[in-house]
Amino acid sequence: MSQGNNNNMTYYIVIALTVVLVLMAATIYANSQTGYSTDTPNTIQMNGKAEKMIVPDTAQLSIGVVIEAPTSNEATQQNAAIMSVVLDELKALGLEDREIQTSYVSVYPVYNYDGKRTIEGYSASNSVQVTTTKMDILGDIIDRSAASGANQIGGIYFTVSDEKQKELREELINEAVADASSKAEMLASSLGVSIVGVQTSSISDSTQPRIYYDMMEAPMEEAAMDTPVEPGESSVSISVYVTYLIG
């Protein structure tokens, strides 16, 4: 191939590469301009929160009976007899069937490991979970259960019922929205812009903390005085997340 042809080929290649580079640069510029297009709305995001302390209106506690006897049949029968008395006492206090739920039942051998493993008896357990809004009789529930033979009284959980939380929901949402709006207005003013609308919003309910009171799981004798039980206060809160349009 002659020198003239080689020069022509080099010339055309340079022209072609130049065209490709120009097209790539134009595409990148167009994309960058699209990213900052005035059609894309300007926004700021803000969260708001409202919280209220309220007295719990629901309590949960575990009441059980554990009996050891030489045979599984004796252990089961003795346990059932005592648990029947306990349940009768609970119902006599005004608890309904729906407030008492069996939570644990077991029968297992008790081993003696002196030298070699041998069965020296059987243990029968039966527990119920009491869930009630009758907060004024909690002390009586504990005392009369113990007096009736219950020897495994677990912890007490205080919670706020769904019904009570629903009553507060609208009030807390309004307060949380007002909190978010106030902070967004303050930020917009600092930036020299104005809020012109809302793009998106969402609500988050808090996971309600449960107040726990530990009760000794040991044989209990009838007390001379009523067991005092105080539910204290619990927190209910709602958060909102709002994306505001600004101009």
Image (cartoon, rainbow, N blue to C red):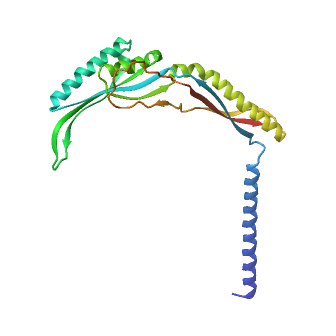
The answer to whether one can see residue 112 in this image is yes
- On the image, the x and y values in percent for residue 58 come to 47, 21
Q: Position of residue 162 (x, y in %)?
A: 51, 22
Q: Nearer the viewer, residue 163 or 11?
A: 163
Where is residue 145, by image quadrant? top left
Quick one: quadrant of the C terminus? top right
Q: Is residue 243 left or right of residue 96?
A: right
Residue 229 x %, y %: 47, 22
Residue sitting farthest toward the front:
224
Residue at 37 percent across and 17 percent down: it is 98
- Camera-nearest residue between 193 and 233: 233
Number of labels in the image equals 0
Is 39 above or below relative to 13? above
Which residue is at a point 35% across and 18% down the rendered structure image?
144
**View extreme (bottom): residue:** 2
The quadrant where residue 95 appears: top left
**Please, which residue is most extreme toward the right here?**
192
Q: Quadrant of residue 121?
A: top left
Task: Please tell me which residue lies in front, 103 or 199.
Answer: 103
Q: Quarter of the image containing the N terminus?
A: bottom right
For this rendering, which residue is in front, 206 or 141?
A: 141
Residue 89, x across and y down, in percent: 32, 15
Question: Is 58 on the left or on the right of 85, as rendered?
Answer: right
Q: Is residue 247 visible?
A: no
